[in-house]
Image (tube, helix red, strand yellow):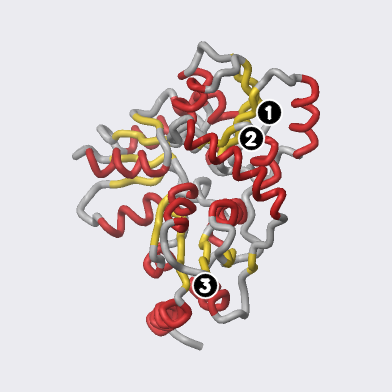
Amino acid sequence: MMNHQELKQAVLEEKKKQGVLILAHTYQSPDVLEIADITGDSFALSKAAQHIEADRVLMCGVRFMAETVKILSPDKEVILSHPGAGCPMAEQIPPKSVEQYRREHPDHAVCAYINTTAELKALADVCVTSSSAVEIVARIPQQDILFIPDKNLGSYVKQKVPQKNIHLMNGYCHVHNGIRPEHILRCKQQHPGAKVAIHPECPAEAVALADMAGSTKEIIEYALGTEDDVIFATERGVYDELSLRYPNRNFYQLEPELMTCVNMKKTTLQGVYDALTGRGGEVIVMDESLRRAASASIENMLKYGG
């Protein structure tokens, strides 16, 4: 049994020997982020993988992220580090519900958050990220738009783009949806003067109490761009990483236990090593017709400014 340092070195040697590109979402644990070639949010990772000459890509994240890499890089072998790492929100809306909605509302556009399965992306007109959702929804020519799956992000967009009629389904991030106003008020009381940075996947009444709302990338940029103390109202991976990188800053995590994505934390350094050596992980296989259909909604996202 290797100790942590030996395991880390073994992972670095193995990925170099095999020429594997390791992608790690920001919500991964610090030891996984440490061995990754690229870190960031889901779509940034997928885009980065497109432009790097590597035949094999290992995704340290959840299933929809590995699927998105495969959609954009069909010629690469894409491996999900932990086969059991799913995203409940991405899988929450049944494709048949969207198919029925389209039949009943043929003049409506369907806008899918990037945090969805390939099947849902294939049914959508356009994809969005949390940072591009407002801009893209404002540019969609249709007046009526079904936003899936996240009702909280959809409500945030609805508030920012009142000229559109945005329709929602009952999807949500099980981590961010748990944030309540009293959590924020209590943390602000404990840390007077600290600014609250929140993800728009949180409920509207919590977002209203924050000093800024934005994507994972925007939250990080905000925290590093201010001299104020910052409270993170998002998955704890952001806090874990920034507090290690900037030990002299006063960063605080809102409700650490509540703000922990169990699925994201399924990936471990040992799991990464096992996936590299063929004893773990899962190669993502996707029907080409599904991939092409899902790709169209992502291409439209880029067209509208994502």
Residue 105: image location, x then y, percent: 74, 19
* Circle 2 residues within 10 Å: few <14, some 14–19, many ≥20: many
Toward the bottom, the furthest residue is: 1
* Circle 1 residues within 10 Å: few <14, some 14–19, many ≥20: some
Instruction: Identify the residue under disc 3.
Output: 272
Q: Is residue 144 left or right of residue 32?
A: right
Estimate the spatial distance between the alpha carbons at disc 2 and disc 3, rounded to whole Å.
29 Å
Instruction: Identify the residue under disc 1.
Output: 169
- Indicate the quadrant where residue 194 lies: top left
Q: Nearer the viewer, residue 114 or 184?
A: 114
Instruction: Identify the residue under disc 2.
Output: 149
- Indicate the quadrant where residue 83 lies: bottom right
Residue drawn at (65%, 28%) of the image: 110
Determine the secondary structure under disc 1: loop
Tags 2 and 3 in contact by the CB under 8 Å rule? no
Q: Earlier in the sequence, mark 2 or mark 3?
A: 2
Q: Earlier in the sequence, mark 3 or mark 1?
A: 1
